[in-house]
Amino acid sequence: MKVLVTGGGGYIGSILVQMLLEKGYKVKCLDRFFFGMETLSNVLGDPNLEIVKDDIRWFDPNILRDVDTVMDLAALSNDPAGELDPRKTMEINYKGRVRVATLSKKYQVERYILASSCSVYGFQDGVVDERSPINPLTTYAKANALAEEETLPLADDSFSVTVLRQATVYGLSPRMRFDLAINGMVLGFYKHGKIPIMRDGTQWRPFVHIRDTAGAFIKVLESERDLVNKEVFNVGSNEQNYQIKPLAELIAEAIGLPFNFEWYGSPDNRSYRVDFSKIRDVLGFKPKYTPKEGAREIYDALVEGRVKDSIKTRTVDWYKFLIEAQKIVKEVELRGVIL
């Protein structure tokens, strides 16, 4: 079986590609590689891996001809990055992924799995599940909601469509990100002896380890079609719904250091608790990792020098850098034409 992973060089994608290869699947990885090819350095050269350096908005659809399943993870990631250029976020995260799904069906791919996010729930007072009304508050969340809305109706007896609404992810990755809650808390503790907490610390958020969420994609791939076709699953576990400040205290305990923190940012208007019973009961999915284990592995990797903080580990900063670099190149080219 051959699997196409869009965004396969990203934070989750690089782990997912590795796990698929370990299970013996043939993998095509489609990515722009804005963060470099080194995100796949541990699997480059694998005979079952094919790299396609391209964009979901305009790739040649012929690459789909021998593909059995598409796992669509390509996107401008997270809420702050989505606000850098809302128009482009919609163009990629919404229209681009609808294009991937539509072409997948046209080229007779059997399964399409969309990487969505629990951020579509926005602000909710109670515990939400897949039947709850959504309330996307950011461009990133709205793009996910629109992508869900237009890809699910493509499903039929020969084309299976599944939406995975992932909790906030944490854990080590070759394309490391320190702009995610748990990862950022650990980095703050490592660098400054203080955990950064977004105000006011009472907001609820669900969490899932990176290897667990990657495992959910594989679980859908290997499940009976009738169980996953036209379905939406929240990905995570009921035990990993946390309020942010108590979570920070848990991280300090995991690392083995006295709890010390500093506030940052404006009060977060995103707060939601999520019910993950469906994916547990229908697919038998159960996460293997906890925030304590995830925090410890990140802290140890920082201490041992296996992972380092850089501009590339902060998505918004790196995108801003690329945008400015592109402006400079265009200005130089324009001056060359004028001169």
Image (spheres, grey):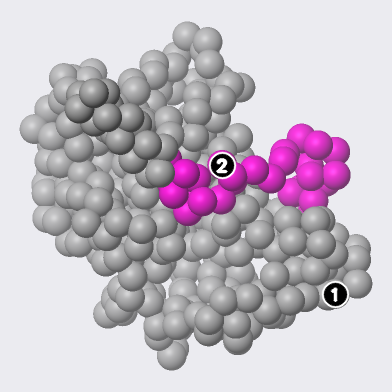
- Between residue 63 and residue 176, name the one nearer to us: 176
At label 1, counting other C-alpha atoms closer than 10 Å, the crowd grade (few under 14, some 14-19, many 20 or more) is some
Residue at the far left in the pictured view: 106
- Secondary structure at numbered mark 2: helix
The quarter of the picture where the N terminus appears is top left
Read off the magenta span.
Answer: 296-322
Q: What label does residue 213 carry, if any? A: none
Q: Position of residue 193 (x, y in %)?
A: 85, 64
| 73 sits to left or right of 151 | right
Q: Is residue 226 shown above or below 109?
A: below
Residue 135 falls left or right of residue 298 = left
Q: Does label 2 or label 1 sit earlier along the sequence?
A: 1
For the point 46% across and 74% down, the residue is 275
Q: Quadrant of residue 211?
A: top right
Quadrant occupied by the C terminus? top left
Mark whose residue sits in front, 2 or 1: 2
Where 24 sits versus 101, above or below? above
Mark 2 surroundings: few (<14), some (14-19) or many (≥20) residues within 10 A: some
Q: Residue at x 53, y 16 (%)?
A: 44
Q: Which residue is mark 1?
A: 259
How many marks the image carries: the answer is: 2
Q: Nearer the viewer, residue 108 or 125?
A: 125
What separation in Å lies between label 2 and label 1 (alpha carbons)?
Answer: 28 Å
Residue 302: image x %, image y %?
79, 44
**Can residue 208 be seen in the rendering of this structure?**
no
Residue that numbered label 2 is attached to: 312
Asked if residue 86 lies left or right of residue 304, the reply is left
Q: Is 155 part of what is drawn in magenta?
A: no
Query: Which residue shows up at 52% across the image and 62% down it?
Result: 168
- The residue sitting at the bottom extreme is 125
Instruction: Point out residue 315 in the picture as x, y percentages from the top left corner.
Output: 50, 50
Q: Nearer the viewer, residue 170 or 53?
A: 53
